[in-house]
Image (cartoon, rainbow, N blue to C red):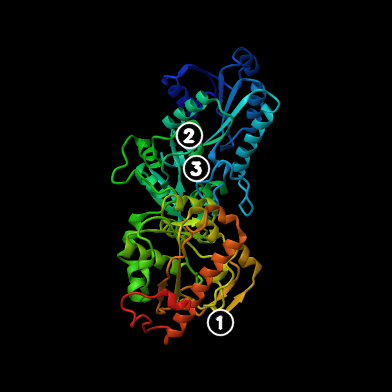
């Protein structure tokens, strides 16, 4: 049994919800509330063994951020109590197209390349103040970072947006958001008090949801608005929330404190007006992949592009395992991500499996392209996201040449460049996943790059390595004929996972994969007679013997 003292401002909606909820929990012996203006030092001396829960007062001029002065006074008065729990916010991670998604507690809130965000900096300062306040004292400090709490009167922008009859979104964007039910926050606080464990913990819902679906579930009429208009009436942090995803992982609190939210983001949104999420699945992909969206496009746009416009022929798909983890290694050409999209469509149509691609952040920076790539399964290229995919026995697609491979000049475009630091081999070894090389000839011709301008302003704005000069300036892809070949898998189970740290083994496997891919590309290019029509595989009606391309 535990005793709790809740420090929250009068009429604070989160404090009110916590007080009501904690009073009903069976493991809580007593829960009482005090206000920030009370004599907290004296109360702390009278109740040093209680768990003190601090709900930071919000800044009236910027309700999404804490009041730094009030928080400092509260924490200074409570230094020395047995257990101090501070409610921070997942907004310590600002929305950004560089945000990798589902970040853990050890991910640095301040990362290179991210835009400055005043709200995030205020929450970061709060956590630093809490750490300074208890340093040198026996106090156990626990910092909880809940995502947006859906509760009546919440100062969080997304919570307020869900309570309107007419809401708005940013034209061309549909970020993945996390909405936390107040009841789940109560259970998280109870678990924190029961374990009294120091550390930082994210409190994130079981499943995120696209903003468009959240507004629909809450009964909000959505009005998409251009960014320049929204910036006239809202701060930049609000516009960022409507543009970029900023999800966090709740794995640590589940593992160490035994807490998992019972309510998904979609359920939390629907509960705003007390109704179930009608006509929508409660389950949601943690990175925003929408298989229903992919299936709809497969009947229209993707089918047209694959079968009619680019007339893609393929061989060797039998080399792709029908179950289990796989690392699909490809070469990215054509300046835009259509070759990856066509691979996704082909594999889903022929095998029923869905591919997730590690992508450059610039693909989720621009309107309309951002939601398109997220719903198709694009993931920010990082080790954590690669691990997440393979831990679930899915297909992970990697283009080891990186973004520069897509910007190669047309002359010599089918000569592979450097494979970076061979991270794809290390990932495959760590997970004991086979590597399936895949090459396409024809995709480079949809936007053949005849020149590149090294323009600093363009590089800063677009985050592309160059401004490419193509016949249609990247507006209309040319209807070239594509030829895709899947090669025999390169196994990794002959090496232990620890071989990922052996440079010689990693380099040897990388050279083998690259040699196979280059040989296949050379052979396909030699067979091709015309760029816009003609078949390469006419004589191979059954399967393609990939060994002939490396002999």
The residue wearing badge 2 is: 154
Q: Is residue 242 above or below residue 320?
A: above
Q: Secondary structure at mark 1?
A: loop
Q: Is residue 165 above or below residue 184?
A: below
Picture residue at 57% right of the left edge, 46% below the top: 94
The residue wearing badge 3 is: 249
Q: Position of residue 233 (x, y in %)?
A: 53, 48
Q: Secondary structure at mark 2?
A: loop
Q: Secondary structure at mark 3?
A: loop
Upstream in sequence: badge 1 or badge 2: 2
Q: Is residue 450 above or below residue 219?
A: below
CA gap, disc 1 and disc 2: 58 Å
Q: Nearer the viewer, residue 413 or 22?
A: 413
The residue wearing badge 1 is: 411
Q: Is residue 259 visible?
A: yes
Upstream in sequence: badge 3 or badge 1: 3
Count the labels in the image.
Answer: 3
Q: Mark 1: give few (<14), some (14-19) or many (20+) Cα within 10 Å.
A: few
Picture residue at 47% right of the left edge, 30% below the top: 188
* Extreme residue toward the left, this view: 279
Which quadrant of the structure image shows residue 24? top left
Left or right: 550 as drawn, with respect to 537: right
Q: Nearer the viewer, residue 542 or 53?
A: 542
Q: Position of residue 107 (x, y in %)?
A: 58, 45
Q: Nearer the viewer, residue 540 or 493?
A: 493
């Amino acid at each position: 049994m535990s005793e709790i003292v809740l420090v929250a401002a009068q009429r604070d909606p989160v404090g009110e919800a916590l007080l009501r909820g904690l009073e009903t929990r069976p493991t809580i012996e007593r829960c009482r509330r005090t206000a920030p203006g009370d004599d907290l030092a004296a109360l702390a001396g009278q109740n040093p063994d209680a768990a003190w829960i601090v709900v930071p007062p919000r800044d009236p001029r910027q309700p999404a951020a804490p009041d730094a002065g009030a928080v400092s006074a509260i924490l200074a008065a409570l230094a020395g109590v047995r257990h101090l729990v501070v409610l921070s916010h997942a907004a310590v991670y600002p929305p950004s197209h560089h945000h990798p998604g589902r970040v853990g507690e050890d991910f640095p809130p301040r990362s290179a390349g991210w835009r400055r965000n005043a709200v995030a900096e205020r929450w970061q300062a709060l956590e630093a103040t809490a750490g300074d306040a208890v340093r040198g004292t026996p106090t156990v400090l626990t910092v909880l970072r809940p995502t947006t709490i859906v509760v009546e009167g919440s100062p969080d922008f997304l919570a307020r947006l869900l309570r309107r009859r007419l809401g708005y979104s940013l034209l061309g964007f549909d970020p993945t958001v996390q909405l936390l039910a107040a009841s789940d926050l109560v259970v998280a606080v109870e678990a924190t008090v029961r374990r009294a464990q120091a550390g930082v913990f994210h409190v994130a819902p079981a499943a995120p949801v696209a903003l468009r679906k959240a507004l629909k579930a809450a009964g909000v009429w959505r009005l998409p608005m251009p960014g320049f208009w929204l910036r006239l009436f809202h701060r930049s942090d609000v516009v960022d929330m409507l543009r970029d995803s900023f999800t966090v992982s709740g794995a640590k609190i589940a593992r160490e404190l035994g807490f998992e939210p019972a309510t998904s983001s979609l359920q939390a949104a629907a509960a705003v007006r007390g109704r179930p999420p009608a006509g929508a699945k409660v389950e949601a992909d943690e990175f925003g992949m929408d298989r229903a969206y992919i299936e709809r496009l497969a009947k229209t746009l993707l089918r047209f592009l694959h079968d009619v416009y680019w007339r893609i022929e393929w061989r060797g798909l039998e080399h792709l395992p029908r179950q289990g983890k796989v690392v699909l290694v490809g070469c990215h050409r054509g300046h835009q991500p259509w070759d990856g999209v066509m691979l996704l469509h082909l594999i889903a149509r022929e095998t029923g499996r869905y591919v997730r691609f590690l992508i450059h952040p610039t693909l989720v920076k621009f309107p309309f392209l951002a939601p398109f790539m997220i719903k198709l399964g694009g993931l920010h290229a990082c080790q954590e996201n690669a691990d997440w995919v393979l831990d679930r026995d899915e297909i992970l697609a990697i283009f080891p040449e990186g973004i520069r491979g897509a910007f190669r000049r047309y002359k010599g475009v089918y000569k592979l460049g450097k494979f970076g630091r061979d991270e794809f081999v290390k990932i495959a070894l760590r997970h004991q996943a086979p590597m399936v090389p895949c090459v396409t000839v024809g995709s480079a011709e949809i936007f053949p790059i005849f020149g590149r301008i090294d323009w600093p302003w363009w590089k800063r704005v677009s985050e592309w390595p160059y401004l490419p000069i193509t016949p249609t300036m990247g507006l209309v892809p040319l209807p070239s004929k594509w030829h895709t070949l899947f090669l025999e898998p390169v196994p990794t189970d002959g090496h232990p996972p620890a071989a990922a740290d052996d440079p010689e083994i990693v380099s040897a496997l990388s050279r083998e994969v690259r040699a196979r891919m280059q040989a296949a590309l050379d052979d396909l290019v030699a067979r091709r007679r015309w760029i816009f029509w003609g078949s390469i595989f006419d004589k191979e009606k059954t399967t393609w013997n990939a060994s002939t391309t490396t002999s």
